[in-house]
Image (cartoon, helix red, strand yellow):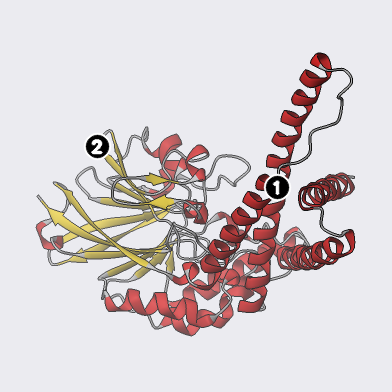
Amino acid sequence: MILIVSLLILITLIAYSFLGFRAAFKTPTSKLIISYGILLAVFVAGILLIWQRQTSDYGNVSLWLNLLIGMLTAIFLLLLFSVFFFGIEDIARLFVWIFVSLLKPKNRAFPKRNKNVARTLLFIGAITLVLVLYGVLFGFSHYKVHRVVVEHEDIPASFDGFTVAQLSDMHLGTFGSIMQVEKGLEMLQKEHPDLLLFTGDLVNNRSSEAIPYIELLKAIEAPYGKFAVLGNHDYAHYARQLTQIDQEADELKLRDILNSIGFTILENQNTAILRGNDSIVIAGVENWGIAPFPQYGDLSKALAGVSDSNFVILLSHDPSHWTEQVLGFYAPVNLTLSGHTHGMQLGIETKLFKWSPVKYRYRNWSGMHEQDGKLLYVNRGFGGIGFPGRIGIRPEITIFELSSK
């Protein structure tokens, strides 16, 4: 029923947009039908491909598929823009018609559409298409290395200058080219981090999405180890065609893949990293997020045996966990590393200004945050899901340098 209602709404919006452009330009109906037909063909093909992706294992790596999905996104945005602006114009035309009818009852002709509105919409649509195609072709692999110095009195002197790399939200099934992933991992390897931490969402739906990238990920070296936690997408819950038993089996396969890559999975556990006579603690929780996301994380288990004098880095996929539980927790957590938000893969980031629509869902959506002496860093993500591109919010590799006060 929901699908039928959604289709009826979509058909109504398309028809309204069609009538708006036809009235504005007085284009021969046949030519406009052909133009709209081509756009709708791309639109429908894109919807079918997205549906196929959502119900499969994202196993087909294809840049052409991503481009088609990008064009679908641009067409859908143009449709929304046209309905919005034509709607405003029609409301204004209605008020003008009522006003004129009251003053001059004999002149009740309904005002014609303004061509400039339609021209502006086409201009906006062209810009949107360019941005979307840029986001798919270049933005999705336009990686940025963020360097962050973490200074804290609990960091032992032996760890002064110690480097920790963070990857998050790889979503390997979304990439259109293995070379896109290879480019980012080569940038990471050039940093020669002492320790590598991964904060979840290796795949979108199923573990098989990671198979083409196993050797690339295995080649990343970190002398003090590689540790990971699971994100909400790693439990195969979004592979809805699978039974619960099959989802649990696929989750085990993903864990095996992470182990084969060289990651130690911290499932509500902690481990000590030794350097000289000193140590720091890396703790990890299973995914914990505000509903509808799963809440498997258990801080008490993850921090069992940790001393108040230890410098603790907690891996927790969803940054809402920091706000809801970590801040008020009795045991010390100096630095929490999260991801999950992707910066919505869309926004503006400059030295003076930072904005993304995701800020209205997550207060802490990127970069470093501090409260009550505790730190949270939210990684913008290495990959993405849904829209296979990025506009304004670049994919991230984070390098932390520990500094002992």
Residue 214 left/right relative to 336: right
Q: CA distance from mark 1 to mark 2?
A: 58 Å
Q: Is residue 324 above or below residue 77?
A: above
Instruction: Using the image as rendered, state which of residue 208 and residue 352 is in the foreground.
Output: 352
Q: How far across and down, in percent of the image, does residue 238 sit?
A: 68, 58
Specify whether residue 62 is in view: no
Q: Could you say which quadrant of the image residue 207 lies in?
A: bottom right
Which mark is on residue 77?
none
Residue 195 left/right relative to 218: left
Q: Amino acid at mark 2?
A: Gly
Q: Could you say which quadrant of the image residue 242 lies in?
A: bottom right
Q: For mark 1, give the secondary structure.
A: helix
Which mark is on residue 373?
2
Instruction: Using the image as rendered, state which of residue 365 and residue 70 is in the foreground.
Output: 70
Q: How far across and down, in percent of the image, does residue 106 sit?
A: 89, 20
Q: How far across and down, in percent of the image, does residue 111 sit?
A: 79, 33
Specify whether residue 70 is in view: yes
Instruction: Using the image as rendered, state which of residue 35 and residue 168 is in the foreground.
Output: 35
Q: For mark 2, give the secondary structure.
A: loop
- Residue ID for mark 1: 115
Q: How far across and down, in percent of the image, does residue 110 sit?
A: 84, 32
Which residue: 40% across, 74% down? 184
Q: How many marks?
A: 2
Which residue: 36% across, 47% down? 304
Tag 1 near tag 2, CB within 8 Å: no
Q: Is residue 210 above or below residue 74?
A: below
